[in-house]
């Protein structure tokens, strides 16, 4: 199967079976999404969603977080992974957001990456989810699922995966494609025990073909 045809079938499947796909992180503002996304690094969305209500109650905006004491932030987020580093990044992000961007979350991924704790993946999440920009965040789920299905070939890095995916996905579908692949990886194409028998993509999945 040619790569273009595989992409077409995968997109058609998700459009039919998952027409609505969005982040499972709970947020109301761009600021809140940056906070949640920084916390989500190597941590489940379920855990993050348990942490953010108390964090945002204490620090409802970038100004209050920028002035926060590290020990106060740490105490609230200590149940997530790497709380020391994330405490530093959260406060640093808020300070830069206030001092450099006047409290306005930028939409450009290069500008977003100037915020502490915001790498390319997080920047792409913010740009696509908040601003509907045609950029695609590659996390471990997207990386794994894309390779298994055969959407990416010999892709050794998230950036190479991103470039291969956006080359073949129609621009208007790039923002939702991230959620399609992520959620599929989280609930169906799992890392250790993929649920191939119940997967609607198995007819055009290279991983399934090789196993059978």
Image (tube, helix red, strand yellow):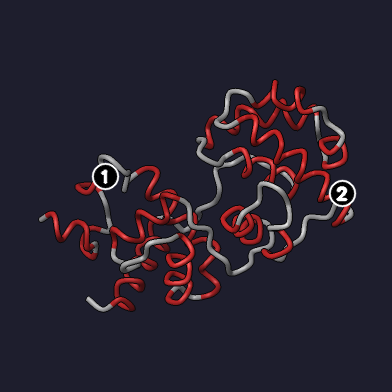
What residue is disc 2 on?
98
What residue is disc 1 on?
194
The spot of residue 140 in percent (x, y) is 43, 49
User: Which residue is pictured at 64% across the width and 40% down the height?
Assistant: 36
Residue most extreme to the top = 75
Q: In this view, does 160 lie to the left or right of 4?
A: right
The spot of residue 60 in percent (x, y) is 81, 35
User: Which residue is pictured at 53% across the width and 37% down the height?
Assistant: 45
Number of other residues with Cα within 10 Å of mark 2, as a class: few under 14, some 14 to 19, many 20 or more: some
Q: Nearer the viewer, residue 183 or 111?
A: 111
Q: How far apart are marks 2 and 1 (CA)?
A: 44 Å
Q: In this view, does 53 lie to the left or right of 61?
A: left
Q: How many labels does the image show?
A: 2
Split into 4 quadrants, where in the image is the N terminus? Answer: bottom left
Split into 4 quadrants, where in the image is the C terminus? Answer: bottom left
Q: Is the Cβ of the residue at disc 2 closer than 8 Å to that at disc 1?
A: no
User: Which residue is pictured at 70% across the width and 25% down the height?
Assistant: 74
Residue 72: image tag = none
The spot of residue 34 in percent (x, y) is 69, 47
Number of other residues with Cα within 10 Å of mark 1, as a class: few under 14, some 14 to 19, many 20 or more: some
What kind of element bears circle 2? helix
What kind of element bears circle 1? loop
Residue 39 sits in which quadrant? top right
Comparing marks 2 and 1, which lies closer to the viewer? Answer: 2
Q: In this view, does 200 lie to the left or right of 125?
A: left
User: Which residue is pictured at 32% across the width and 60% down the height?
Assistant: 147
Of labels 2 and 1, earlier in sequence is 2
């Amino acid at each position: 199967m040619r790569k273009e045809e595989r992409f077409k079938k995968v997109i058609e499947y998700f459009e039919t079976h998952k027409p609505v796909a969005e982040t499972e992180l709970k947020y109301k503002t761009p600021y809140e999404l940056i906070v949640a996304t920084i916390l989500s690094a190597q941590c489940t969305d379920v855990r993050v969603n348990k942490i953010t209500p108390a964090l945002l109650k204490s620090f409802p905006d970038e100004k209050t977080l920028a002035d926060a004491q590290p020990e106060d932030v740490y105490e609230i987020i200590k149940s997530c992974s790497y709380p020391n580093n994330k405490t530093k990044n959260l406060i640093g992000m808020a300070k830069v957001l206030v001092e450099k961007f006047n409290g306005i979350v930028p939409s450009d991924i290069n500008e977003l990456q100037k915020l502490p704790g915001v790498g390319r993946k997080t920047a792409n999440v913010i740009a696509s989810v908040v601003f509907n920009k045609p950029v695609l965040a590659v996390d471990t789920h997207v990386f794994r699922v894309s390779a298994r299905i055969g959407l990416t070939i010999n892709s050794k890095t998230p950036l190479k995966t991103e470039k291969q995916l956006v080359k073949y996905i129609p621009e208007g579908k790039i923002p939702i494609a991230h959620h399609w692949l992520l959620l599929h990886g989280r609930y169906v194409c799992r890392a250790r025990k993929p649920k191939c028998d119940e997967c609607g993509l198995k007819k055009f999945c290279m991983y399934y073909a090789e196993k059978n």
